[in-house]
Amino acid sequence: MKKCVFLLLSLGALLLLSACKDPAPPESGDAERETVSLTVWGAEEDEALLQEIFASFQSRYAGEADFRITYQPQSESHCKDALLGDLEGGADVFAFADDQVAALAAAGGLNPIQDSNAIRSANLSAAVEAASVGGTLYAYPLTADNGYFLYYNKAYFNQEDVQSLDRMLEIAAEAGRRITMDWSSAWYVYAFFGNTGLQVGLNEDGLTNFCTWNSAEGPIAGVDVAQAMLDVAASPGFASRTDEEFLAGVRDGSVIAGISGVWNAVTIQESWGENAGAAKLPTFTCKGQQVQMASFSGCKLIGVNAYSKHPEWAARLAEWITSEENQRLRFELRGQGPANANAAASTEVQAAPAIAALLAQSEFSQLQRVGGKFWDPVAEFAGNMARGNPSGAELQAQLDRLVEGVTAR
């Protein structure tokens, strides 16, 4: 009994001593915040815009994680090749052209979008289709304007002039100026073949191409198109120039019209001011008739790397980049047409000359769906046409070689 009383007294003394001590610091109610490192690939000219978007993203989620977002410039047209070269070391979030979505999905670089219903309902149906494979959405629509049309200087051309490439070349030659188009890019060269009855596209395997550009049958043969290109190249009013060279000519006054896309709208507006004009592509003379120039169309998309170490945050950032608010900001700063339905329907977007020209050209455009073997053979052929076919090689033989390369397996 004495032993029990002693134990009770000892316990009471311990409790009293404990009460007299300073209280222990309370345990933190918040676990240590996660540090989220994300790498984003985007077009070089989008860096300032993306940095602004990153800042707003970090502000929005400031209480949930510590972010380290790294921007790296990467061509949207070559994103697939860069990413598939090292999926695990590639960007967490990346911008790319829609014609790459099938290959990226097939290679395991993209997972299906989980909240696809919300993304589908928020964006234009054509943009959703471009971001899908077999009806499954794999990427976030960013723009619905990845096509090309005609920019022209109103000081030299009126609305009737820009309907005909022949007339435009005549005016440019008389003025000692140039009209430009990039024949080093097969993307633009499609303009001459697209509305002639000659065809190119993907086979059912989704990888290889079919192509009839060397056909000798039908109302217009392949050699007719080749000759038309040679006639254009022979004009002193024409020059095949890259996009960068086109803009340099716009700035120094040597170029008064050119075929390009909405990504150059801001620069052209700054250079030409009230004389900046935009229209659908003109017609060109082929086999004695006027043929409306065609175009490839498409969208820019944002993808989330299936190998990202932070897939949920990467998806949140992709959604943020492509949100209605930030697509409006992209239009404001870069002049790019939104894929978001509400942003695309805004008065500002609808009134933009470049967007209006793109919509007018859409009647003569085709969604870009060609395999990787398309690009180099077409660029090689067109480059020779731009130089005036100096070797004198037969046009049919060159077209046969083109088709052999494009359809190679």
Image (tube, grey):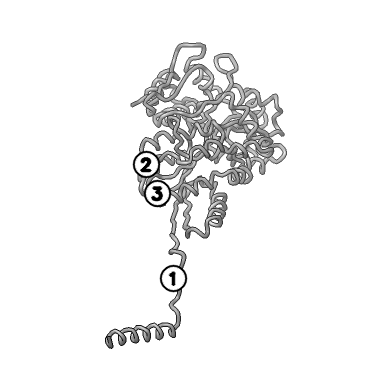
User: Amino acid type of disc 2?
Assistant: Leu
Quadrant for the C terminus, please.
top left
Marks 3 and 1, Cα distance to the nearest angstrom? 33 Å
Disc 1 marks which residue? 27
Residue 69: give x, y in percent of width and height: 48, 55
Q: Earlier in the sequence, mark 3 or mark 2?
A: 2
Determine the residue positioned at 53% across, 34% down.
Answer: 127
User: Amino acid type of disc 3?
Assistant: Ser
- Badge 2 marks a residue whose secondary structure is helix
Quadrant for the N terminus, please.
bottom left
- Badge 1 marks a residue whose secondary structure is loop
**In front here: 165 or 26?**
26
Circle 2 or circle 1, nearest the eye: 1
What mark, if any, has residue 136 been given in the picture? none
Residue 6: give x, y in percent of width and height: 30, 87
Question: Is disc 2 surrounded by few (<14), some (14 to 19) or many (20+) residues within 10 Å?
Answer: some
Q: Is disc 2 in contact with disc 1, using a CB cutoff of under 8 Å? A: no
User: Amino acid type of disc 1?
Assistant: Glu
Circle 3 or circle 2, nearest the eye: 3
Circle 3 or circle 1, nearest the eye: 1
**In front here: 15 or 378?**
15
Marks 2 and 1, Cα distance to the nearest angstrom? 46 Å
Where 368 falls versus 68 (above or below)?
Answer: above
The image quadrant of residue 104 is: top left
Where 198 falls versus 373 (above or below)?
Answer: above
Disc 3 marks which residue? 308
Marks 3 and 2, Cα distance to the nearest angstrom? 13 Å
Disc 2 marks which residue? 84
Residue 73: give x, y in percent of width and height: 48, 48
